[in-house]
Image (cartoon, rainbow, N blue to C red):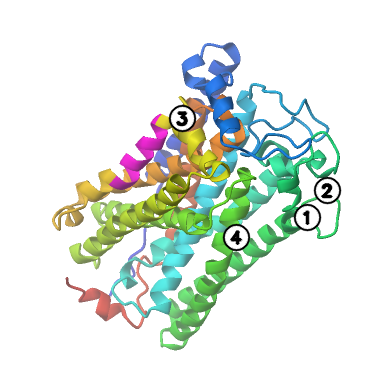
């Protein structure tokens, strides 16, 4: 069997770089329009509206003593820990949008990298043979993980006050004007137990560093073993990869949920959902599956992956179809439980997304892109076996779940000053181009198919 390799030639690099450059130009144009006032439509909410403010208050964020009435992230947070008047509303700037967009893209593309490791690991742990010919693609996606770790840690250390309301020190000053008893009760989760709170969030940062350290270490072990197996053959490396895959799945089961609480749910500091870890995982998982499928289809169209058959693509299409439904199941379960209980401190999360002129349209677009469209597009057997349907469905799902993370983070940080326009689209394109560049560059370094994988014959004769 020939050692088929992907040629990441100058033409492909140029296309990826052009997409990144267009993203930067759109991002810059969004900033110009915002600063000149000519981008009022692009800003989508230059000032807080009375409706959005009332929704937050009506949701019943508990106010005990002198505590601040802010309960959904940084929407009404002080500009500094010494800060502004507790009840003051103020407009967020374009720079605030940039910081939140940076965090959204960090979380989203970190998830895609982790799903690359997860997909690879779960195939070995389950002794799956059908996927052998496509395993190098998720493994290449995982090369973003070290970059993601640097970006996540750097963004948090530089801009934590802009993203997370709980980082303001005066929230923990008992008897102070901004004391918040609910957030104060959670301080030991973020800060050193027994401390006054409001200092350096050592536990939060420690969790981030430990999680990324474990993910990168396990990914490096499995990648090196996979490349060694490709050169030396035998079953020894397969068993070792299977062992480390099982370890990774155990680590990921805990770390993915805790990361979802830390990186996304803690934005809405008063609010919580026991299903949120599953919800973020479902969004990461289906978008990662869609990206794997899209890359496989594009490589097939370019003449690569000769051993990948229409049956393999059918299986990948079924994954995207099935887990779009799974994501919807988690979404609806979380929504329904909160809706019929109608407890103010829980329902505020959906009120500020459904009753806002800025976010309510995207709330429904989110459902259309992530459930209705892939469900209808990939429902039939033939659709899962046609390149055009797979490409369209996967592109919509990949973009749709970025929108899902936008809806998770923006209302709780920017409130009614949030917007969606050239700034958001440009940064998403830039991050996407960088992620794809890293993925394709890693993919070009080794053979596209592991020639000595012990289950290669099973993959070659896979039929459904």
Name the residue rendered at 44%, 51% in the picture.
337
| Lower position in the chain sequence, tag 1 or tag 3 | 1
Using the image, determine if residue 137 lies above or below residue 430: below
Between the C-alphas of marks 1 and 4, the distance is 15 Å
> What's the mark number on residue 191?
1
- Give percent across and percent down for residue 39: 51, 15
Residue bearing mark 4: 258
Frontmost residue, 4 versus 243: 243
Q: Residues within 10 Å of mark 3 (few under 14, many from 20)?
A: some
Q: Is 369 within the magenta? A: yes
Name the residue rendered at 67%, 44% in the picture.
155
Frontmost residue, 246 versus 417: 417
Q: Is residue 262 left or right of residue 334?
A: right
Q: Which residues are magenta?
A: 361-371
Name the residue rendered at 66%, 40% in the picture.
62
| Lower position in the chain sequence, tag 1 or tag 4 | 1
Frontmost residue, 11 versus 21: 21
Query: In the structure shown, which secondary structural element does the residue marked by tag 3 occupy?
Result: loop
Residue bearing mark 3: 355
Between the C-alphas of marks 2 and 3, the distance is 35 Å
> What's the mark number on residue 427?
none
> What's the mark number on residue 199?
2
Query: In the structure shown, which secondary structural element does the residue marked by tag 2 occupy?
Result: loop
Q: Quadrant of the N terminus?
A: bottom left
Q: Quadrant of residue 48?
A: top right
- Give percent across and percent down for residue 216: 59, 65
- Give percent across and percent down for residue 15: 39, 39
Q: Residues within 10 Å of mark 2 (few under 14, many from 20)?
A: some
Query: In the structure shown, which secondary structural element does the residue marked by tag 4 occupy?
Result: helix
């Amino acid at each position: 069997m020939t050692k088929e390799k992907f040629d990441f030639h100058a033409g492909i690099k140029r296309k990826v770089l052009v997409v990144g450059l267009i993203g930067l130009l759109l991002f810059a144009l969004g900033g110009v329009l915002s600063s000149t006032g000519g981008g009022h439509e692009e800003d989508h909410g230059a000032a807080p509206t009375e409706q959005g403010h009332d929704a937050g208050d009506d949701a019943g964020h508990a106010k005990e003593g002198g505590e601040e009435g802010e309960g959904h992230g940084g929407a009404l947070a002080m500009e500094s820990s010494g800060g502004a008047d507790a009840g003051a509303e103020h407009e967020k700037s374009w720079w605030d949008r940039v910081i939140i967009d940076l965090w959204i893209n960090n979380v989203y593309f970190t998830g895609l990298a982790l799903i690359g490791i997860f997909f690879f690991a779960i195939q070995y742990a389950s002794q799956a043979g059908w996927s052998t010919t496509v395993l190098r693609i998720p493994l290449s996606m995982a090369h973003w993980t070290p970059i993601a770790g640097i970006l996540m840690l750097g963004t948090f250390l530089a801009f934590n006050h802009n993203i997370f309301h709980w980082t303001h020190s005066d929230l923990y000053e008992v008897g102070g004007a901004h004391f918040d008893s609910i957030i104060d009760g959670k301080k030991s989760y973020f800060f050193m137990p027994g401390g006054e709170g409001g200092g350096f969030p050592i536990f939060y940062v420690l969790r981030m560093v430990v999680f990324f350290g474990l993910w990168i270490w396990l990914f490096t072990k499995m990648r090196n073993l996979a490349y060694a197996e490709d050169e030396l053959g035998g079953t020894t490396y397969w068993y070792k990869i299977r062992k480390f895959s099982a370890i990774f799945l155990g680590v990921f089961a805990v770390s993915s949920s805790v990361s979802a609480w830390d990186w996304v749910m803690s934005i809405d500091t008063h609010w919580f959902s026991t299903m949120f870890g599953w919800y973020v995982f479902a969004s990461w998982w289906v978008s990662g599956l869609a990206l794997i499928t899209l890359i496989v289809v594009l490589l097939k169209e370019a003449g690569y992956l000769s051993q990948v058959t229409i049956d393999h693509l059918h299986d990948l299409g079924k994954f995207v179809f099935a887990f779009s439904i799974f994501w919807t199941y988690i979404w609806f379960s979380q929504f329904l439980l909160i809706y019929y209980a109608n407890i103010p401190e829980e329902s505020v999360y959906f009120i500020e997304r459904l009753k806002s002129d800025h976010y309510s349209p995207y709330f429904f677009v989110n459902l259309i892109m992530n459930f209705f469209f892939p469900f209808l597009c990939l429902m039939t057997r033939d659709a899962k076996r046609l390149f055009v349907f797979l490409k369209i469905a996967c592109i919509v799902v990949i973009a749709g779940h970025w929108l899902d993370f936008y809806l998770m983070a923006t209302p709780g940080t920017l409130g009614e000053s949030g917007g969606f326009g050239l700034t958001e689209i440009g940064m998403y394109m830039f991050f996407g181009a960088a992620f794809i560049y890293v993925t394709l560059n890693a993919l070009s370094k080794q053979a596209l198919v592991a020639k000595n994988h012990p289950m290669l014959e099973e993959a070659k004769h896979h039929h459904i």
